[in-house]
Amino acid sequence: MSLQVLINEQPVDIDAELLKTGVQVEPGVYSILVNGKSFEVRVFPTPQGWTVQVDGVRYAAEVRDPRNSSRRSKAARGAGRQNINAPMPGKVIRVLVHEGATVETGQGLVVVEAMKMQNEMKASRPGRVVEIRVRDGDTVGSGETLVVLE
Amino acid sequence: MFSARGARAKVLVANRGEIAVRIVRALREMDIRSVAVFSDADRGSLHVRLADEAAHLGAAPATESYLNIERILAAAKKHEVDAIHPGYGFLSENALFAEACENAGIIFIGPPKEAIRRLGSKTAARALAKEVNVPVVPGSEEPATHLDHARELARSIGYPVLLKAAAGGGGKGMRRVDKESDLEAAVRDASSEAERAFHNSEVYIEKVIENPRHIEIQIVGDPYGNLVHLGERECSLQRRHQKVIEECPSPLVARNPEMRDSMGEAALRVARAVGYYNLGTVEFLADNEGNFYFLEVNTRLQVEHPVTELVSGLDLVQLQLKIAAGEALPFAQEDIHWNGWAMECRICAEDPENQFFPSPGKIVQLREPSGPGIRLDSGVYPGWTIPLEYDPLLAKLVAWAPDRKAAIHRLLRALREYSITGVDTNVGFFREILKDSRFVEGHLDTNFIADYFARRGAKAAPEPEYERIAAVAVAAHSAREQKAPANGKQESSRWLIGGRNEQLR
């Protein structure tokens, strides 16, 4: 019997034998001994699944049931529209683009201020601005969509 | 101490976070009662938990709480304190606050208000430094009054120039301008940023010193004319003009030992000129030839004071309290000795892989480093929610060792032990920087971090077995959570592993 885990969206197969190498030592903290080597791993929930940290390196993880592995195809999450969301509550200082604009990877879209810091939300890939949902001076909540790219 | 009332002395700490904790610790060691103050966002914060008494100020925004002179003084009167320690930031360099304390019959733990006032304006401080023959970066003595004036000043100084807020600090209202065509926009941005941050839109203009190092001198004095310097700190590792790593001694000064005396003497000349006492820091820019230029004076305790404490063996906060209570400085310049090397990392809730975007939120797990030569000044605990109203500094991790290399190794060891989950932090970033050969060799300047990001290229791939290790932990954990979901947490139905738990155990 095996279980599939997605680590940074890449499948890793786990069997019961491997699962026995880990013990929980603190809530969400696992000590894992593999081939005589000792690792400490931290697991905590995120809205998307789990974040796992090994020796300071972080991985996004999802646990998958093999019976349903085709349920969420990559295409559904990948190309097409992309929402640029506020990573935390803050205030919109400036909207840097207008609807219909073509943007490059790394181009600044919106400047948001939080914790005394101004930060530019940037496009993670090239595209076109199809919708702007905020204006200068708006207060935004965590995860709120600022701009939609296509 | 502060013995006018005969009762046990009591001090209010007008600050929050790690520095409030630091001051509460000093107070307890001196058997002085501590009064914490807090905003709505900080009711459960560590400084409130550790203090003897605590007073609520108001809503989370600093203007309603930590910057509100009236409310802080009301709390001070209600709790009948003898003195107020302002920490750093907030009201620490506000002469009006120092004066208001004095008028209320409460000792302000810091320099005299006249000194704060005179050194608070950067242009006035520069003029003062020049008067006492301390070199300054070539620049305008007066703020630029309008765009044409700015143009004229910039031309006479020569590009590239730096615009700086006259009332500024922390990089706010600061802009580098390489050519005249960029000046207009930069003046506009810098003035409006300065207006927002300091309610003073004045900017002045300075020549840019290329690849400078930031070196500062710690000074301390009493009201009886005793004034000494406690050596330098190098704070060249900065990001957007915010210090990131600080150390004592400076690697540059270690190579040019005469710099400590000459910079120390220069710092003391500025301090003497304004009748300075209590703790202060005189900041300089230095080039690799050993030339140095006066920048400004911080009339308060610095964030990075622990590196000086570890190398000098002095407790600077206790010294502040003793001086404020009227004691004379217990040492002279020749009694000050520097032993070994100390280095500090500012641990912040921010994401280094996303332009250091702040990352407020709840700390889920926390393991703090300890062991030989490690000092951790922290203001957080597991379960604490970092408010988004204040700066993202969580803790200062400081290592002491006999020499710089050993201090770096010690810090790396401690950073490996340090684990904070739930929010992003710069712990991993420090582990990279401290292994960088240019850093290890002490080739520092204020552009180091920007240059580092430009040259580091792709991140080294982590160990391939980590992915499998991570998968094991998450599989075990999700199976466990499935059986006994934590209180208030959403059911993990979406992981759909229900019946398989039995087989997996």
Image (cartoon, rainbow, N blue to C red):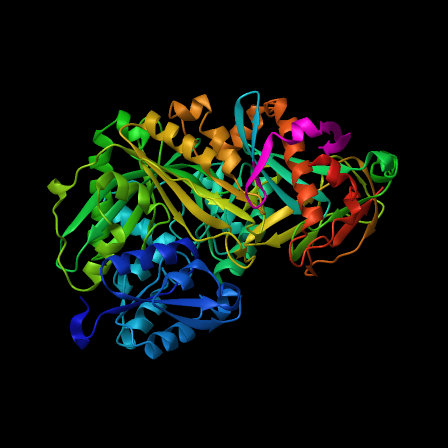
Image coordinates for residue B109, horizontal then vertical, percent: 27, 63
Q: In the displayed structure, does residue B292 sit left or right of residue B360? A: left
B56 is higher (above) or lower (below) than B234: below
Name which quarter of the figure residue B86 lies in.
bottom left
Q: Nearer the viewer, residue B248 or B28?
A: B28
User: In terms of image quadrants, where is residue B387?
Assistant: bottom right
Could you tell me which residue is drawn at 83 percent across and 39 percent down?
A77
Please state the horizontal and vertical placement of residue B415, each as a whole percent of the image: 45, 35
Q: Residue at x 76, y 52 (%)?
A: A145
Judged left or right of residue B486, residue A131 is right
Q: Position of residue B160 (x, y in %)?
A: 49, 36
Q: Is residue A46 visible?
A: no
**Residue B382 to residue B500: above or below:** below
Q: Is residue A62 above or below residue B74?
A: above
Q: Quadrant of the N terminus of chain B?
A: bottom left
| Residue at (21% x, 30% y) in the render | B258
Q: Nearer the viewer, residue B272 or A6?
A: A6
Tell me where the magenta segment starts and ends, as one range.
Answer: A1-30
Q: Is residue B241 left or right of residue B293?
A: right
Residue at the location (47% across, 49% down)?
B394
